Image: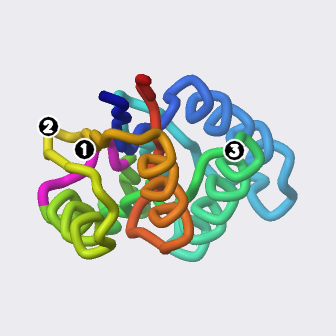
Amino acid sequence: MPSFDIVSEVEMNEVRNAVENANRELATRYDFRGVEASFELNDNKVKLAADAELQLQQMRDMLRGALIKRGIDVRVLDAGSIVRSGKRHVQEMSFLQGIDSALAKKLVKKIKDSKIKVQASIQGEQLRVTGKKRDDLQQVMAMLRAEEQDQPLQFNNFRD
C-alpha cells in the first residue's frame, strides 16, 4: 500500500551557514561599528546579543534574510522574549522541529474532511498517510501545499 510521511524539519547545516553569513554581515555593517553584537548557534537555538533593542530587531531581520538566502522557511523561527541584563539585550530564537499534536490533529481533520480515500495517523512528531492509489496521495500533498500552515511541511519517505 502506498504511503508517505508529513514532517517539519530544519536542516541544521543550512542554519549554521546562515548564522555564519549573518555574523559576517554584522561585522561589515557600519551601524554596528563599535557595538558588541553577535549571533551564537547552540543546538536548535540562535542567541542574539546586542546593546540595544533596536539593534536586536535589525539582527533578527539580518538572520531572517540569511535564512531565506539558504532556502529555509522563516516560519520555523520561534522568537523568545528579550532579556535585559545591564546594558546587554539578549534574545533566543529557537527552530520548530516536528509537528506538534495540535497541528497534527488539525491536518488529520483536513485530510478526513477532504473525502479522499486515504488514512492519516499520527506517529510521534510526524504524520503517516496511506492509501490504495498513488494519485490519492498526490491529491493530499497538493491540498496541503495549497493551504497555508503555521509551519512548513515536507513530504518524505514516499513508498509505493
Q: CA distance from mark 3 to mark 2?
A: 27 Å
**Of marks 3 and 1, the one in the foreground:** 1
Q: Mark 3: which secondary structure?
A: loop
Say which amino acid is labelled 2.
Gln
Residue at point 58%, 76% (across, down): 54
Q: Pointer 3: residues within 10 angstroms few (<14), some, or many (20+)?
A: few
- Judging depth in this view, the residue of 48 and 88 nearest the camera is 48
Residue position for label 1: 127
Q: Is residue 103 magenta?
A: no
Residue at point 53%, 70% (across, down): 52
| Magenta segment boundaries in residue numbering | 96-101
Image coordinates for residue 125, horizontal then vertical, percent: 20, 40
Q: Is residue 142 left or right of residue 30?
A: left
Image coordinates for residue 157, horizontal then vertical, percent: 41, 25
- The mark nearer the N terminus, 3 or 1, is 3
Say which amino acid is labelled 3.
Gly
Image coordinates for residue 1, horizontal then vertical, percent: 30, 28
Residue at point 63%, 58% (across, down): 64
Marks 1,2: beta carbons within 8 A:
yes
| Residue 142 visible, this orientation | yes
